[in-house]
Image (cartoon, rainbow, N blue to C red):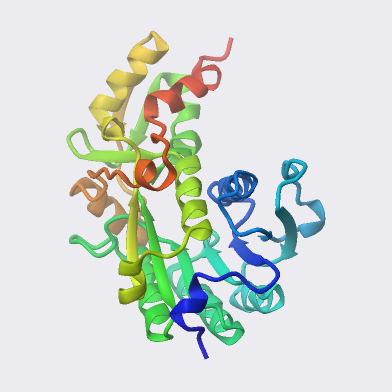
Amino acid sequence: EVQSSKMVNAAAADEERLLVLGATGNVGRHVIARLVFLAGAGRTSQRVRILAATRQPGAYSCDPPPEGCPAVVEPVACGASAGEVAACVAAARPTRIFLCMPQALSADEMRAYSEAVVDAAVACGVAWLVRLSSCGIDRAPSQGPLGDAHLAGEEYCRKAGMGLTSVRPTSFHTNFEKYDVGSIAAESVFRSPLGLTAKVNWVHCRDIGYVVAALLASPISPEALAARFEVVEVTGPASSTLSAGEMAAMLSEELGRPVRYEEVPAPPFPEYEALWTFLKAGGFDHSSDAVARLTGEEPLGMREVVRALRAELQPST
């Protein structure tokens, strides 16, 4: 039976056990670093065990908590299949869970993975799940199969009786690193199916991780407890909501040379065609105050991302 709402905000008798699924990913590593910081600052329960789920626990490493910090980071084994993640949850015996699914999963695999986490969590008596999703999944037009899989996972969680915080970010800054940095350095051009007029907000993965850590370390709000559900839309600052033309202008200014944009077709797969239709309709043309409100820090902007990547964005000589 799922714990009562009183138990949601209480640590176990000896320690809080926070399971981070996806601990080595773009968001998870920031979640763990921030949880250690919050514990050291006295903003978590007295003893915190951060369970870092990874495929290779023997190879896992992170900065050790400072002396006197009441946090311990413990790597735990977790694979990419539904059965493996269920076994991880059962063995970890967490009090709260952050779920960030592997990026390579299909829509059907996303559903199976998410449901396995919920089933195992309910069996362990976990009352609340913090789950990484996507901004705008409940707005038209649909994000397609991937967005639908997120919605189905959330609905399954709620029907199982678990409380849920749906963390819904806009476009990760790491997408820019992965898809655009190479062509900008080599050709002074970046390409996407977005078109010239639609705008996308870019959010730094550090800020997503900081928000998730704040949610894991803090009591759940009375409003969320009453509804057993809350949505937190995590975005970059309004200045990071950019059209392709605005992005090209900012890149040209920061790099001191012309950078241009080229529109290309969406990949010929239903999942990606639907996602780009959503983005071209303004699905990520949105910003919120969640980062500042929940972490006390201003979100990083795309100019800061570009400045941090300046060396990688320069032409090779």
Q: Nearer the viewer, residue 93 or 120?
A: 93
The quarter of the rendered structure image containing the C terminus is: top right
User: Residue at position x 31%, y 55% from top?
Assistant: 135
| Residue extending farthest bottom | 1
User: Residue at position x 55%, y 22% from top?
Assistant: 312
Q: How many marks?
A: 0
Residue 269 visible from this viewpoint: no
User: Residue at position x 60%, y 59% from top?
Assistant: 45
> Is residue 202 shown above or below 88?
above
Residue 38 visible from this viewpoint: yes
User: Residue at position x 59%, y 72% from top?
Assistant: 95
> Is residue 219 shown above or below 159?
above
Give residue 8's position: percent from left, percent from top.
49, 74
Give residue 309's position: percent from left, percent from top.
51, 23
Q: Nearer the viewer, residue 140 or 301?
A: 301
| Residue extending farthest right | 58
Q: Is residue 64 left or right of residue 193?
A: right
Give residue 198's position: percent from left, percent from top.
20, 39
